[in-house]
Image (cartoon, helix red, strand yellow):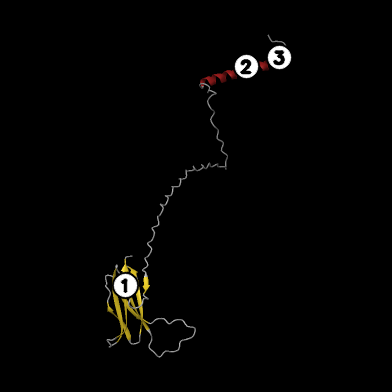
């Protein structure tokens, strides 16, 4: 029995409702046959969106390696300056004593005796000193340097004056004497003589 007022419209609604119920039942059965519904707690897969024409290159930052600490430099050991030995200065004495005198010197002292030489004459040691006390180191004949003068010296007609130098070294404590004579060549007679006694003491 048709309900009053529905007519064609009511039939259309009923058909649509039935189709909807049928579709719902089919969808449920299909879901049940495909297995259990995944749990909502599972994480959704990440979606990677790639943009055409744009490549992002991630450059890893370099790991800073620890710089080595500088090795401590060894401290230079203090250098102790070795005092250099002061060179010893040999004392030298110019003999100014008159002939026949006595002089005292310390061992190690050098004595220089200078005597003027007459032209055509020469000094010779006639009495040698004791070499263990006073040794003869050498003899020398030379021309002395002229004394400085404000006016030039007139030319000399005589022979050039020369000097004779006798060098002796005091060796050890003791007393000794020596003598010299100035003689002309071929003449045994002495023109002049000089003698000296030397007392050597310990240094």
Q: Quadrant of the N terminus?
A: top right
Q: Position of residue 96 (x, y in %)?
A: 37, 76
Helix, strand or loop under label 1: strand
Relative to 203, say whether 3 is above or below. above
Q: Position of residue 67 (x, y in %)?
A: 47, 45
Looking at the image, tell me whether mark 2 or mark 1 is earlier in sequence order: 2
Q: Local crowd at mark 3 within 10 Å, few (<14), some, or many (≥20)?
A: few
Helix, strand or loop under label 2: helix
Q: Position of residue 69 (x, y in %)?
A: 46, 45
For residue 139, which quarter of the picture?
A: bottom left
Question: Nearest the camera: 105 or 45?
Answer: 105
Whether tag 3 and tag 2 are in contact, CB under 8 A, the answer is no
How far apart are labels 2 and 1 at the CA level?
A: 164 Å
How far apart are labels 1 and 3 at the CA level?
A: 178 Å
Name the front one of labels 3 and 2.
Answer: 2
Question: Nearest the camera: 87 or 54?
Answer: 87
Could you tell whether 6 is left or right of 193 in the image? right
Q: Which residue is mark 1?
A: 198
Question: Nearest the camera: 160 or 68?
Answer: 160
In the rendering, which numbered label is found on residue 7? 3
């Amino acid at each position: 029995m048709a309900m009053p007022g529905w007519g064609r419209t009511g039939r259309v609604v009923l058909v649509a409702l039935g189709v909807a119920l049928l579709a719902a039942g089919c969808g449920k059965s299909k879901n049940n046959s495909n297995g259990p519904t995944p749990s909502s707690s599972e994480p959704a897969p990440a979606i990677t969106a790639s943009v055409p024409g744009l490549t992002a290159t991630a450059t890893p930052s370099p790991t800073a390696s620890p710089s080595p600490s500088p090795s401590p430099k060894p401290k230079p050991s203090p250098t102790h300056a070795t005092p250099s030995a002061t060179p010893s200065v040999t004392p030298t004495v110019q003999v100014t004593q008159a002939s026949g005198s006595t002089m005292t010197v310390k061992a190690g002292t050098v004595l220089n005796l200078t005597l003027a030489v007459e032209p055509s004459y020469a000094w010779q040691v006639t009495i040698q000193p004791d070499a263990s006390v006073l040794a003869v180191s050498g003899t020398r004949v030379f021309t002395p340097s002229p004394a400085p003068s404000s006016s030039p010296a007139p030319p000399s007609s005589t022979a050039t004056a020369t000097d004779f130098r006798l060098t002796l070294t005091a060796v050890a404590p003791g007393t000794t004497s020596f003598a010299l004579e100035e003689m002309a060549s071929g003449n045994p007679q002495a023109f002049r003589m000089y003698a000296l006694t030397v007392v050597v003491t310990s240094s």
